[in-house]
Image (tube, helix red, strand yellow):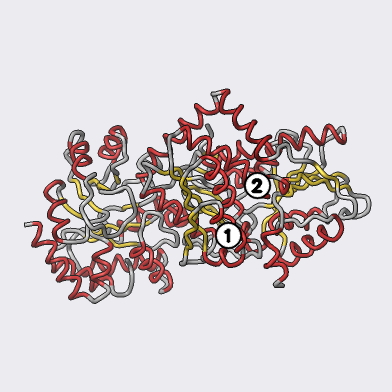
Protein backbone atom coordinates (compact mmCIF):
# COMPACT_ATOMS: atom_id res chain seq x y z
CA UNK A 1 0.00 0.00 0.00
CA UNK A 2 1.23 3.46 -0.80
CA UNK A 3 1.98 5.40 2.39
CA UNK A 4 3.65 8.35 0.71
CA UNK A 5 3.11 10.23 -2.53
CA UNK A 6 6.51 11.54 -3.45
CA UNK A 7 7.49 13.50 -0.37
CA UNK A 8 3.88 13.87 0.73
CA UNK A 9 1.73 11.79 3.05
CA UNK A 10 3.22 9.67 5.82
CA UNK A 11 2.26 9.35 9.45
CA UNK A 12 2.88 12.40 11.59
CA UNK A 13 0.82 11.41 14.60
CA UNK A 14 1.39 10.74 18.30
CA UNK A 15 2.87 7.32 18.99
CA UNK A 16 -0.40 6.19 20.63
CA UNK A 17 -2.06 5.98 17.20
CA UNK A 18 0.60 4.06 15.31
CA UNK A 19 -0.53 0.56 16.31
CA UNK A 20 -4.11 1.50 15.37
CA UNK A 21 -2.92 2.69 11.95
CA UNK A 22 -1.01 -0.57 11.52
CA UNK A 23 -4.16 -2.50 12.45
CA UNK A 24 -6.16 -0.40 9.99
CA UNK A 25 -3.65 -1.06 7.24
CA UNK A 26 -3.72 -4.82 7.85
CA UNK A 27 -7.52 -4.85 8.03
CA UNK A 28 -7.82 -2.88 4.80
CA UNK A 29 -5.35 -5.10 3.01
CA UNK A 30 -7.24 -8.23 4.12
CA UNK A 31 -10.56 -6.68 3.12
CA UNK A 32 -9.25 -5.93 -0.35
CA UNK A 33 -8.16 -9.54 -0.73
CA UNK A 34 -11.55 -10.83 0.43
CA UNK A 35 -14.12 -11.24 -2.39
CA UNK A 36 -16.91 -11.08 0.21
CA UNK A 37 -15.91 -7.50 1.08
CA UNK A 38 -16.09 -6.38 -2.53
CA UNK A 39 -19.43 -8.14 -2.97
CA UNK A 40 -20.91 -6.50 0.11
CA UNK A 41 -19.60 -3.09 -0.98
CA UNK A 42 -21.09 -3.54 -4.45
CA UNK A 43 -24.41 -4.76 -3.06
CA UNK A 44 -24.71 -1.81 -0.67
CA UNK A 45 -23.62 0.50 -3.46
CA UNK A 46 -26.41 -0.60 -5.74
CA UNK A 47 -29.19 -1.19 -3.17
CA UNK A 48 -28.47 1.43 -0.53
CA UNK A 49 -26.47 4.21 -2.16
CA UNK A 50 -28.13 4.06 -5.58
CA UNK A 51 -25.11 3.34 -7.76
CA UNK A 52 -24.25 3.75 -10.48
CA UNK A 53 -24.96 7.44 -10.39
CA UNK A 54 -26.06 8.74 -13.80
CA UNK A 55 -24.21 10.91 -16.25
CA UNK A 56 -26.28 13.87 -17.35
CA UNK A 57 -25.43 16.22 -20.20
CA UNK A 58 -26.58 19.76 -19.50
CA UNK A 59 -28.89 21.30 -22.08
CA UNK A 60 -28.90 25.02 -21.27
CA UNK A 61 -26.06 25.41 -18.76
CA UNK A 62 -23.19 24.84 -21.19
CA UNK A 63 -21.98 27.78 -23.28
CA UNK A 64 -22.52 27.50 -27.05
CA UNK A 65 -20.22 24.98 -28.69
CA UNK A 66 -19.45 23.18 -25.44
CA UNK A 67 -20.84 20.00 -23.98
CA UNK A 68 -20.81 19.84 -20.20
CA UNK A 69 -21.56 16.45 -18.70
CA UNK A 70 -22.27 16.01 -15.01
CA UNK A 71 -21.44 12.94 -12.93
CA UNK A 72 -24.44 13.02 -10.63
CA UNK A 73 -23.09 12.09 -7.20
CA UNK A 74 -25.72 14.48 -5.84
CA UNK A 75 -28.29 11.76 -6.56
CA UNK A 76 -26.70 9.31 -4.14
CA UNK A 77 -28.42 8.44 -0.88
CA UNK A 78 -27.70 11.32 1.57
CA UNK A 79 -27.01 13.62 -1.36
CA UNK A 80 -23.29 13.53 -1.93
CA UNK A 81 -20.29 11.40 -2.82
CA UNK A 82 -19.40 11.10 0.87
CA UNK A 83 -21.59 8.03 1.29
CA UNK A 84 -19.29 5.95 -0.98
CA UNK A 85 -16.48 6.32 1.53
CA UNK A 86 -18.70 5.98 4.60
CA UNK A 87 -20.19 2.68 3.44
CA UNK A 88 -16.77 1.23 2.67
CA UNK A 89 -15.18 2.34 5.92
CA UNK A 90 -18.10 1.15 8.05
CA UNK A 91 -17.63 -2.33 6.57
CA UNK A 92 -13.96 -2.04 7.48
CA UNK A 93 -14.77 -0.86 11.01
CA UNK A 94 -17.10 -3.83 11.43
CA UNK A 95 -14.37 -6.22 10.29
CA UNK A 96 -12.06 -4.67 12.91
CA UNK A 97 -14.69 -5.21 15.61
CA UNK A 98 -15.11 -1.51 16.47
CA UNK A 99 -18.47 -0.48 17.91
CA UNK A 100 -17.92 3.26 18.27
CA UNK A 101 -17.36 5.60 15.32
CA UNK A 102 -15.98 9.14 15.42
CA UNK A 103 -15.89 11.49 12.46
CA UNK A 104 -15.35 15.15 11.62
CA UNK A 105 -17.54 17.13 9.30
CA UNK A 106 -17.40 20.50 7.59
CA UNK A 107 -20.42 20.96 5.34
CA UNK A 108 -22.11 18.17 7.25
CA UNK A 109 -22.31 15.83 4.27
CA UNK A 110 -19.68 13.46 5.65
CA UNK A 111 -21.25 13.67 9.09
CA UNK A 112 -24.64 12.78 7.65
CA UNK A 113 -23.14 9.93 5.62
CA UNK A 114 -21.38 8.60 8.71
CA UNK A 115 -24.48 8.94 10.91
CA UNK A 116 -26.43 7.15 8.19
CA UNK A 117 -24.18 4.11 7.97
CA UNK A 118 -23.89 3.97 11.78
CA UNK A 119 -27.67 3.80 11.97
CA UNK A 120 -27.69 1.09 9.30
CA UNK A 121 -25.05 -0.96 11.15
CA UNK A 122 -26.18 -0.21 14.70
CA UNK A 123 -22.99 1.55 15.81
CA UNK A 124 -22.48 4.46 18.20
CA UNK A 125 -21.66 7.65 16.29
CA UNK A 126 -20.01 10.87 17.46
CA UNK A 127 -19.49 13.66 14.94
CA UNK A 128 -17.30 16.71 15.61
CA UNK A 129 -18.34 19.89 13.83
CA UNK A 130 -17.14 23.45 14.16
CA UNK A 131 -19.75 25.75 15.68
CA UNK A 132 -19.49 28.12 12.70
CA UNK A 133 -20.29 25.21 10.38
CA UNK A 134 -23.17 24.13 12.65
CA UNK A 135 -24.62 27.57 12.09
CA UNK A 136 -24.26 27.69 8.32
CA UNK A 137 -25.16 24.04 7.67
CA UNK A 138 -27.84 23.69 10.29
CA UNK A 139 -30.14 21.27 8.39
CA UNK A 140 -27.34 18.72 8.37
CA UNK A 141 -26.94 19.03 12.14
CA UNK A 142 -30.61 18.17 12.54
CA UNK A 143 -30.30 15.29 10.09
CA UNK A 144 -27.38 13.79 12.00
CA UNK A 145 -29.31 14.00 15.25
CA UNK A 146 -32.39 12.39 13.69
CA UNK A 147 -30.12 9.55 12.56
CA UNK A 148 -29.06 8.97 16.15
CA UNK A 149 -25.64 10.58 16.08
CA UNK A 150 -24.22 12.83 18.77
CA UNK A 151 -22.98 16.10 17.26
CA UNK A 152 -20.26 17.75 19.33
CA UNK A 153 -19.66 21.40 18.55
CA UNK A 154 -16.08 22.63 18.47
CA UNK A 155 -15.86 26.10 19.92
CA UNK A 156 -12.25 27.11 19.44
CA UNK A 157 -9.95 28.29 16.68
CA UNK A 158 -11.69 28.82 13.34
CA UNK A 159 -14.71 26.77 14.53
CA UNK A 160 -14.68 24.98 11.18
CA UNK A 161 -13.43 21.73 9.63
CA UNK A 162 -9.79 22.17 10.70
CA UNK A 163 -10.63 22.21 14.40
CA UNK A 164 -13.34 19.56 14.01
CA UNK A 165 -10.74 17.24 12.48
CA UNK A 166 -8.27 17.91 15.30
CA UNK A 167 -10.91 17.13 17.92
CA UNK A 168 -11.99 13.92 16.16
CA UNK A 169 -8.36 12.77 16.13
CA UNK A 170 -7.96 13.68 19.82
CA UNK A 171 -11.08 11.63 20.61
CA UNK A 172 -9.61 8.73 18.66
CA UNK A 173 -6.32 8.99 20.59
CA UNK A 174 -8.24 8.79 23.86
CA UNK A 175 -10.51 5.90 22.81
CA UNK A 176 -8.35 4.06 20.35
CA UNK A 177 -9.12 0.56 21.68
CA UNK A 178 -12.86 0.81 21.04
CA UNK A 179 -13.19 3.46 18.38
CA UNK A 180 -12.86 3.65 14.63
CA UNK A 181 -12.03 7.04 13.14
CA UNK A 182 -14.06 7.37 9.95
CA UNK A 183 -12.21 10.14 8.15
CA UNK A 184 -14.16 11.96 5.46
CA UNK A 185 -11.56 12.88 2.89
CA UNK A 186 -8.32 11.66 1.34
CA UNK A 187 -6.32 13.37 4.10
CA UNK A 188 -4.87 12.26 7.43
CA UNK A 189 -2.14 9.76 8.24
CA UNK A 190 -1.50 6.74 6.04
CA UNK A 191 -3.31 4.56 5.15
CA UNK A 192 -6.36 6.87 5.18
CA UNK A 193 -5.62 8.80 1.96
CA UNK A 194 -5.34 5.59 -0.05
CA UNK A 195 -8.39 3.97 1.61
CA UNK A 196 -10.56 6.98 0.80
CA UNK A 197 -9.19 7.17 -2.73
CA UNK A 198 -9.99 3.52 -3.40
CA UNK A 199 -13.51 3.87 -2.01
CA UNK A 200 -14.18 7.01 -4.08
CA UNK A 201 -12.55 5.59 -7.22
CA UNK A 202 -15.94 4.09 -8.06
CA UNK A 203 -16.90 7.58 -9.30
CA UNK A 204 -14.15 7.65 -11.89
CA UNK A 205 -14.53 4.01 -12.92
CA UNK A 206 -18.22 4.47 -13.58
CA UNK A 207 -17.78 7.84 -15.27
CA UNK A 208 -15.12 6.55 -17.67
CA UNK A 209 -17.28 3.61 -18.73
CA UNK A 210 -20.36 5.84 -19.02
CA UNK A 211 -18.49 8.36 -21.18
CA UNK A 212 -17.33 5.64 -23.54
CA UNK A 213 -20.82 4.19 -23.62
CA UNK A 214 -22.59 7.48 -24.29
CA UNK A 215 -20.05 9.33 -26.44
CA UNK A 216 -17.67 6.68 -27.68
CA UNK A 217 -14.80 8.74 -26.34
CA UNK A 218 -13.28 10.21 -23.23
CA UNK A 219 -13.82 13.81 -22.16
CA UNK A 220 -11.09 16.30 -22.99
CA UNK A 221 -11.20 17.70 -19.47
CA UNK A 222 -12.35 16.32 -16.13
CA UNK A 223 -13.17 18.98 -13.53
CA UNK A 224 -13.86 18.56 -9.82
CA UNK A 225 -13.82 20.76 -6.74
CA UNK A 226 -11.07 20.21 -4.18
CA UNK A 227 -11.34 20.76 -0.45
CA UNK A 228 -9.68 17.76 1.16
CA UNK A 229 -10.03 16.39 -2.34
CA UNK A 230 -11.90 13.08 -2.08
CA UNK A 231 -14.44 13.54 -4.85
CA UNK A 232 -11.73 14.89 -7.14
CA UNK A 233 -9.31 12.05 -6.40
CA UNK A 234 -12.11 9.53 -6.95
CA UNK A 235 -13.13 11.05 -10.27
CA UNK A 236 -9.52 11.57 -11.40
CA UNK A 237 -8.73 7.93 -10.54
CA UNK A 238 -10.75 6.83 -13.57
CA UNK A 239 -8.78 9.01 -15.97
CA UNK A 240 -5.30 9.45 -14.51
CA UNK A 241 -3.87 6.78 -16.81
CA UNK A 242 -5.48 8.45 -19.84
CA UNK A 243 -2.77 11.04 -20.26
CA UNK A 244 -4.65 12.87 -23.03
CA UNK A 245 -7.41 13.78 -20.54
CA UNK A 246 -6.78 17.04 -18.67
CA UNK A 247 -7.49 16.83 -14.94
CA UNK A 248 -8.52 20.12 -13.35
CA UNK A 249 -9.12 20.58 -9.64
CA UNK A 250 -10.91 23.72 -8.47
CA UNK A 251 -10.18 25.11 -5.03
CA UNK A 252 -11.98 27.88 -3.23
CA UNK A 253 -9.96 31.06 -3.76
CA UNK A 254 -9.69 31.62 -0.01
CA UNK A 255 -8.73 28.02 0.71
CA UNK A 256 -6.27 27.23 -2.08
CA UNK A 257 -4.01 24.74 -0.32
CA UNK A 258 -2.50 23.68 -3.64
CA UNK A 259 -2.47 27.08 -5.31
CA UNK A 260 -1.14 29.13 -2.40
CA UNK A 261 0.12 26.55 0.08
CA UNK A 262 3.54 25.35 1.14
CA UNK A 263 4.77 22.00 2.50
CA UNK A 264 3.60 21.61 6.09
CA UNK A 265 2.30 18.95 8.44
CA UNK A 266 -1.40 18.98 9.30
CA UNK A 267 -3.63 16.25 10.70
CA UNK A 268 -1.05 13.53 10.42
CA UNK A 269 0.32 14.04 6.93
CA UNK A 270 2.79 16.18 5.06
CA UNK A 271 1.07 17.96 2.23
CA UNK A 272 0.59 21.34 0.62
CA UNK A 273 -1.04 23.44 3.31
CA UNK A 274 -2.01 27.05 3.86
CA UNK A 275 0.69 27.83 6.40
CA UNK A 276 3.01 30.68 7.30
CA UNK A 277 6.78 30.53 6.98
CA UNK A 278 7.02 29.09 10.52
CA UNK A 279 4.76 26.13 9.73
CA UNK A 280 1.77 27.55 11.63
CA UNK A 281 -1.48 26.64 9.89
CA UNK A 282 -3.44 29.58 8.48
CA UNK A 283 -7.19 30.02 8.40
CA UNK A 284 -9.01 29.19 5.19
CA UNK A 285 -12.03 31.19 4.04
CA UNK A 286 -14.81 29.97 1.80
CA UNK A 287 -18.56 30.34 1.47
CA UNK A 288 -18.55 26.58 1.12
CA UNK A 289 -17.99 24.80 4.42
CA UNK A 290 -16.79 21.68 2.60
CA UNK A 291 -13.92 23.54 0.93
CA UNK A 292 -13.08 25.68 3.97
CA UNK A 293 -10.00 23.67 4.92
CA UNK A 294 -6.32 24.72 4.83
CA UNK A 295 -5.01 21.28 3.91
CA UNK A 296 -5.48 18.87 1.02
CA UNK A 297 -4.88 15.19 0.35
CA UNK A 298 -1.20 14.36 -0.22
CA UNK A 299 -1.89 12.65 -3.55
CA UNK A 300 -3.20 15.93 -4.96
CA UNK A 301 0.03 17.66 -3.95
CA UNK A 302 1.96 14.98 -5.82
CA UNK A 303 -0.33 15.25 -8.88
CA UNK A 304 0.23 19.00 -8.89
CA UNK A 305 4.02 18.66 -8.65
CA UNK A 306 4.13 16.06 -11.42
CA UNK A 307 1.96 18.24 -13.63
CA UNK A 308 -0.55 15.43 -14.22
CA UNK A 309 -3.33 17.52 -12.70
CA UNK A 310 -3.72 21.28 -12.63
CA UNK A 311 -5.35 23.24 -9.87
CA UNK A 312 -7.20 26.52 -10.26
CA UNK A 313 -9.50 28.54 -8.04
CA UNK A 314 -13.01 30.00 -8.03
CA UNK A 315 -14.20 32.82 -5.79
CA UNK A 316 -17.29 32.76 -3.57
CA UNK A 317 -19.08 35.02 -6.08
CA UNK A 318 -18.19 32.81 -9.04
CA UNK A 319 -19.44 29.73 -7.20
CA UNK A 320 -22.68 31.48 -6.29
CA UNK A 321 -23.22 32.55 -9.89
CA UNK A 322 -22.68 28.99 -11.10
CA UNK A 323 -25.05 27.72 -8.38
CA UNK A 324 -27.81 30.03 -9.66
CA UNK A 325 -27.05 29.27 -13.28
CA UNK A 326 -27.33 25.50 -12.85
CA UNK A 327 -30.55 25.93 -10.86
CA UNK A 328 -32.12 28.21 -13.47
CA UNK A 329 -30.92 26.44 -16.61
CA UNK A 330 -31.12 22.78 -15.58
CA UNK A 331 -33.37 22.54 -12.56
CA UNK A 332 -30.52 21.19 -10.44
CA UNK A 333 -29.44 22.78 -7.16
CA UNK A 334 -25.77 21.93 -6.74
CA UNK A 335 -23.95 22.08 -3.45
CA UNK A 336 -21.73 25.16 -3.15
CA UNK A 337 -18.65 22.90 -3.28
CA UNK A 338 -19.16 21.57 -6.84
CA UNK A 339 -20.48 25.00 -7.83
CA UNK A 340 -16.79 25.98 -7.80
CA UNK A 341 -16.07 23.28 -10.37
CA UNK A 342 -19.07 24.37 -12.44
CA UNK A 343 -17.82 27.95 -12.42
CA UNK A 344 -14.45 27.01 -13.93
CA UNK A 345 -16.01 24.51 -16.34
CA UNK A 346 -17.82 27.43 -17.98
CA UNK A 347 -14.59 29.04 -19.18
CA UNK A 348 -12.61 25.96 -20.16
CA UNK A 349 -11.61 25.87 -23.80
CA UNK A 350 -12.75 22.33 -24.55
CA UNK A 351 -15.58 20.72 -26.43
CA UNK A 352 -16.45 17.84 -24.11
CA UNK A 353 -16.13 18.50 -20.37
CA UNK A 354 -16.94 16.16 -17.49
CA UNK A 355 -17.73 17.80 -14.14
CA UNK A 356 -18.05 15.99 -10.84
CA UNK A 357 -21.32 17.14 -9.32
CA UNK A 358 -20.34 15.90 -5.89
CA UNK A 359 -23.42 16.89 -3.92
CA UNK A 360 -26.77 18.58 -3.90
CA UNK A 361 -27.44 22.07 -2.60
CA UNK A 362 -30.34 21.70 -0.18
CA UNK A 363 -27.97 22.18 2.75
CA UNK A 364 -26.82 25.51 1.29
CA UNK A 365 -30.15 27.23 0.82
CA UNK A 366 -29.86 29.40 3.93
CA UNK A 367 -26.32 30.44 3.00
CA UNK A 368 -27.31 31.26 -0.60
CA UNK A 369 -30.57 33.02 0.27
CA UNK A 370 -28.77 35.02 2.96
CA UNK A 371 -26.59 36.67 0.33
CA UNK B 1 5.05 27.42 26.88
CA UNK B 2 7.59 29.85 25.47
CA UNK B 3 6.79 33.47 26.22
CA UNK B 4 8.17 36.64 27.76
CA UNK B 5 7.76 35.26 31.30
CA UNK B 6 9.44 31.92 30.64
CA UNK B 7 12.92 32.67 32.07
CA UNK B 8 11.41 33.76 35.36
CA UNK B 9 9.09 30.73 35.43
CA UNK B 10 11.98 28.39 34.68
CA UNK B 11 13.92 29.91 37.56
CA UNK B 12 10.92 29.30 39.82
CA UNK B 13 10.63 25.69 38.63
CA UNK B 14 14.32 25.13 39.29
CA UNK B 15 14.04 26.70 42.72
CA UNK B 16 11.06 24.44 43.44
CA UNK B 17 13.17 21.41 42.65
CA UNK B 18 12.63 20.63 38.95
CA UNK B 19 15.43 18.50 37.44
CA UNK B 20 14.54 19.37 33.87
CA UNK B 21 12.35 21.97 32.18
CA UNK B 22 10.31 21.39 29.03
CA UNK B 23 9.56 24.49 26.97
CA UNK B 24 6.65 24.35 24.55
CA UNK B 25 7.19 25.85 21.12
CA UNK B 26 3.56 26.54 20.20
CA UNK B 27 1.87 24.99 17.17
CA UNK B 28 -1.54 26.05 15.86
CA UNK B 29 -2.95 22.51 15.71
CA UNK B 30 -1.45 20.46 18.54
CA UNK B 31 -3.02 17.00 18.18
CA UNK B 32 -1.39 15.49 21.26
CA UNK B 33 -2.52 18.25 23.59
CA UNK B 34 -5.61 18.72 25.70
CA UNK B 35 -7.31 22.06 26.33
CA UNK B 36 -4.83 23.58 28.83
CA UNK B 37 -1.75 23.31 26.61
CA UNK B 38 -3.76 24.03 23.46
CA UNK B 39 -5.00 27.30 24.94
CA UNK B 40 -1.49 28.17 26.15
CA UNK B 41 -0.24 27.62 22.59
CA UNK B 42 -2.98 29.83 21.18
CA UNK B 43 -2.02 32.62 23.60
CA UNK B 44 1.68 32.24 22.80
CA UNK B 45 0.99 32.47 19.07
CA UNK B 46 -1.14 35.57 19.64
CA UNK B 47 1.87 37.06 21.44
CA UNK B 48 3.98 36.41 18.35
CA UNK B 49 5.95 33.43 19.63
CA UNK B 50 7.15 31.98 16.34
CA UNK B 51 10.18 29.70 15.98
CA UNK B 52 12.81 32.49 16.03
CA UNK B 53 11.25 34.05 19.12
CA UNK B 54 11.02 30.64 20.81
CA UNK B 55 14.71 29.97 20.16
CA UNK B 56 15.54 33.40 21.60
CA UNK B 57 13.39 32.56 24.63
CA UNK B 58 15.25 29.27 24.99
CA UNK B 59 18.55 31.17 24.99
CA UNK B 60 17.24 33.49 27.72
CA UNK B 61 16.08 30.55 29.82
CA UNK B 62 19.47 28.87 29.33
CA UNK B 63 21.09 31.95 30.83
CA UNK B 64 18.68 31.91 33.77
CA UNK B 65 18.87 28.29 34.97
CA UNK B 66 21.29 25.36 35.01
CA UNK B 67 18.88 22.39 34.64
CA UNK B 68 18.58 20.69 31.22
CA UNK B 69 16.07 22.30 28.84
CA UNK B 70 14.01 20.39 26.31
CA UNK B 71 11.80 22.10 23.72
CA UNK B 72 8.57 20.23 23.01
CA UNK B 73 6.89 20.94 19.71
CA UNK B 74 5.30 19.57 16.53
CA UNK B 75 6.62 18.42 13.18
CA UNK B 76 5.25 21.32 11.17
CA UNK B 77 7.65 23.75 12.85
CA UNK B 78 10.63 21.59 11.95
CA UNK B 79 9.34 21.05 8.41
CA UNK B 80 9.19 24.81 7.91
CA UNK B 81 12.46 25.67 9.65
CA UNK B 82 14.49 22.73 8.31
CA UNK B 83 14.77 19.53 10.34
CA UNK B 84 18.50 19.51 11.01
CA UNK B 85 18.71 23.27 11.23
CA UNK B 86 16.02 23.27 13.92
CA UNK B 87 17.88 20.67 15.97
CA UNK B 88 21.21 22.49 15.52
CA UNK B 89 19.82 25.90 16.44
CA UNK B 90 17.95 24.50 19.44
CA UNK B 91 21.15 22.92 20.72
CA UNK B 92 23.04 26.14 20.11
CA UNK B 93 20.42 27.97 22.13
CA UNK B 94 20.89 25.58 25.03
CA UNK B 95 18.54 22.65 24.50
CA UNK B 96 19.66 19.27 25.83
CA UNK B 97 17.39 17.49 23.37
CA UNK B 98 14.00 17.80 21.62
CA UNK B 99 10.54 16.31 21.92
CA UNK B 100 8.39 16.25 18.77
CA UNK B 101 4.92 15.09 19.79
CA UNK B 102 3.72 14.00 16.35
CA UNK B 103 6.89 12.36 15.11
CA UNK B 104 6.76 8.63 15.85
CA UNK B 105 10.07 6.81 16.17
CA UNK B 106 10.13 5.39 12.64
CA UNK B 107 9.56 8.75 10.97
CA UNK B 108 12.82 10.64 10.50
CA UNK B 109 14.67 8.27 12.87
CA UNK B 110 17.92 10.12 12.18
CA UNK B 111 16.71 13.18 14.08
CA UNK B 112 18.09 12.80 17.62
CA UNK B 113 15.26 13.38 20.09
CA UNK B 114 13.56 12.09 23.18
CA UNK B 115 11.31 9.30 21.92
CA UNK B 116 7.84 8.67 23.27
CA UNK B 117 6.29 5.29 23.94
CA UNK B 118 2.65 4.69 24.78
CA UNK B 119 0.57 1.92 26.33
CA UNK B 120 -0.46 0.96 22.80
CA UNK B 121 3.14 0.65 21.56
CA UNK B 122 4.23 -2.83 20.56
CA UNK B 123 7.32 -4.37 22.18
CA UNK B 124 9.16 -3.95 18.88
CA UNK B 125 8.44 -0.23 18.81
CA UNK B 126 9.43 0.19 22.46
CA UNK B 127 12.72 -1.52 21.67
CA UNK B 128 13.31 0.73 18.66
CA UNK B 129 12.44 3.86 20.65
CA UNK B 130 14.76 2.81 23.49
CA UNK B 131 17.65 2.31 21.07
CA UNK B 132 17.14 5.62 19.27
CA UNK B 133 16.13 7.89 22.13
CA UNK B 134 18.27 10.76 23.28
CA UNK B 135 19.01 10.33 26.99
CA UNK B 136 15.69 9.20 28.39
CA UNK B 137 12.38 7.74 27.26
CA UNK B 138 9.09 9.59 27.62
CA UNK B 139 6.42 7.15 28.79
CA UNK B 140 2.96 8.36 27.82
CA UNK B 141 0.88 6.99 30.69
CA UNK B 142 -2.52 7.10 28.98
CA UNK B 143 -4.10 6.66 25.61
CA UNK B 144 -5.14 10.27 25.30
CA UNK B 145 -4.00 13.85 25.11
CA UNK B 146 -2.17 15.92 27.71
CA UNK B 147 -4.13 17.13 30.71
CA UNK B 148 -5.16 16.26 34.24
CA UNK B 149 -6.86 12.96 35.11
CA UNK B 150 -8.51 12.00 38.37
CA UNK B 151 -6.25 9.00 38.90
CA UNK B 152 -2.90 7.71 37.73
CA UNK B 153 -3.37 5.56 34.67
CA UNK B 154 -3.35 1.80 35.38
CA UNK B 155 -1.60 1.45 32.02
CA UNK B 156 1.65 2.87 33.40
CA UNK B 157 2.77 -0.17 35.42
CA UNK B 158 2.63 -2.64 32.53
CA UNK B 159 4.24 -0.09 30.22
CA UNK B 160 7.14 0.40 32.65
CA UNK B 161 7.53 -3.36 32.95
CA UNK B 162 7.64 -3.87 29.19
CA UNK B 163 10.05 -1.01 28.71
CA UNK B 164 12.37 -2.08 31.54
CA UNK B 165 12.62 -5.48 29.90
CA UNK B 166 14.42 -3.98 26.91
CA UNK B 167 16.37 -0.98 28.16
CA UNK B 168 18.26 0.66 31.01
CA UNK B 169 17.67 4.25 29.88
CA UNK B 170 15.82 6.45 32.41
CA UNK B 171 12.04 6.34 32.06
CA UNK B 172 10.08 9.52 32.73
CA UNK B 173 6.30 9.21 32.87
CA UNK B 174 4.00 11.98 31.69
CA UNK B 175 0.48 12.86 30.45
CA UNK B 176 -2.24 12.93 33.07
CA UNK B 177 -0.02 13.46 36.10
CA UNK B 178 -1.17 16.58 37.94
CA UNK B 179 -1.04 16.05 41.73
CA UNK B 180 1.75 15.23 44.19
CA UNK B 181 -0.04 11.96 44.97
CA UNK B 182 -0.11 10.93 41.31
CA UNK B 183 3.51 12.02 40.91
CA UNK B 184 4.56 9.89 43.87
CA UNK B 185 2.68 6.88 42.55
CA UNK B 186 4.19 7.32 39.07
CA UNK B 187 7.68 7.79 40.51
CA UNK B 188 7.33 4.47 42.36
CA UNK B 189 7.21 2.88 38.92
CA UNK B 190 9.31 5.14 36.70
CA UNK B 191 12.52 7.13 37.19
CA UNK B 192 10.86 10.50 36.96
CA UNK B 193 7.64 12.31 36.18
CA UNK B 194 6.73 14.98 33.67
CA UNK B 195 4.02 17.45 34.69
CA UNK B 196 2.82 19.79 31.97
CA UNK B 197 -0.77 21.03 32.07
CA UNK B 198 -0.93 21.30 35.87
CA UNK B 199 2.35 23.23 35.91
CA UNK B 200 0.98 25.60 33.27
CA UNK B 201 -2.11 26.20 35.39
CA UNK B 202 0.09 26.96 38.40
CA UNK B 203 2.29 29.24 36.30
CA UNK B 204 -0.76 31.26 35.29
CA UNK B 205 -0.76 32.52 38.88
CA UNK B 206 2.85 33.60 38.67
CA UNK B 207 6.33 32.30 39.41
CA UNK B 208 5.85 31.89 43.14
CA UNK B 209 2.79 29.77 42.57
CA UNK B 210 4.72 27.58 40.14
CA UNK B 211 7.64 27.28 42.56
CA UNK B 212 5.30 26.20 45.35
CA UNK B 213 3.61 23.63 43.07
CA UNK B 214 6.93 22.16 41.92
CA UNK B 215 8.13 22.04 45.51
CA UNK B 216 5.05 20.01 46.46
CA UNK B 217 5.77 17.58 43.62
CA UNK B 218 9.42 17.40 44.64
CA UNK B 219 8.49 16.70 48.27
CA UNK B 220 6.16 13.91 47.20
CA UNK B 221 8.97 12.19 45.31
CA UNK B 222 11.41 11.99 48.19
Same chain shared by disc 2 and disc 1? yes
x and y, in percent, of residue B42 in the image: 41, 68
- Taking the image as shown, residue A217 lies to the left or right of residue B89, namely right
Split into 4 quadrants, where in the image is the N terminus of chain B? bottom left
x and y, in percent, of residue A64 in the image: 93, 53
Q: Residues within 10 Å of mark 2 (few under 14, many from 20)?
A: some
Q: Is residue A138 above or below residue A115?
A: below
- Count of labels in the image: 2
Q: Residue furthest right?
A: A64
Q: Residues within 10 Å of mark 1 (few under 14, many from 20)?
A: some
Subunit of mark 2?
Answer: A
x and y, in percent, of residue A199 in the image: 61, 37
Subunit of mark 1?
Answer: A
Q: Is residue B115 above or below residue A212?
A: below
Q: Is residue B220 above or below residue A352?
A: below
- Taking the image as shown, residue A166 lies to the left or right of residue B152, namely right
According to the image, label 1 marks what residue? A142
Q: Quadrant of residue A284?
A: bottom right
Split into 4 quadrants, where in the image is the C terminus of chain B? bottom left
Q: Quadrant of residue B47?
A: bottom left
Instruction: Pick whichever, A244 or B196, lies toward us.
Output: B196
Callout 2: helix, strand or loop? helix
Amino acid sequence: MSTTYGDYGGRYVPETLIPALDELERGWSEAQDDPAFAEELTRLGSQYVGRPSPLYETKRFAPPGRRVVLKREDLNHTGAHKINNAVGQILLASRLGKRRIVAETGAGQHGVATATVCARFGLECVVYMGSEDMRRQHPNVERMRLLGAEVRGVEFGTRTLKEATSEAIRDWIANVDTTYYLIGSCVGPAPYPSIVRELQAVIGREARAQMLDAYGRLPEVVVACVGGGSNAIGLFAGFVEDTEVRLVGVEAAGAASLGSGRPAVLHGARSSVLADSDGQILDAHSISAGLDYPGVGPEHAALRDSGRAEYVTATDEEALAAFHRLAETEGILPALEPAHALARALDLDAELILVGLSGRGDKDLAEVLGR
Amino acid sequence: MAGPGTPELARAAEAGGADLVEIGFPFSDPLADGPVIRRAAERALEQGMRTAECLECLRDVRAAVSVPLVPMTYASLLEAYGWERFADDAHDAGAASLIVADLPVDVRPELRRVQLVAPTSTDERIDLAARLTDGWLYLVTVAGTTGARSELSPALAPLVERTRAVTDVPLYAGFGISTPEQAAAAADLADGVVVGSAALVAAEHGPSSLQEFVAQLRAALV
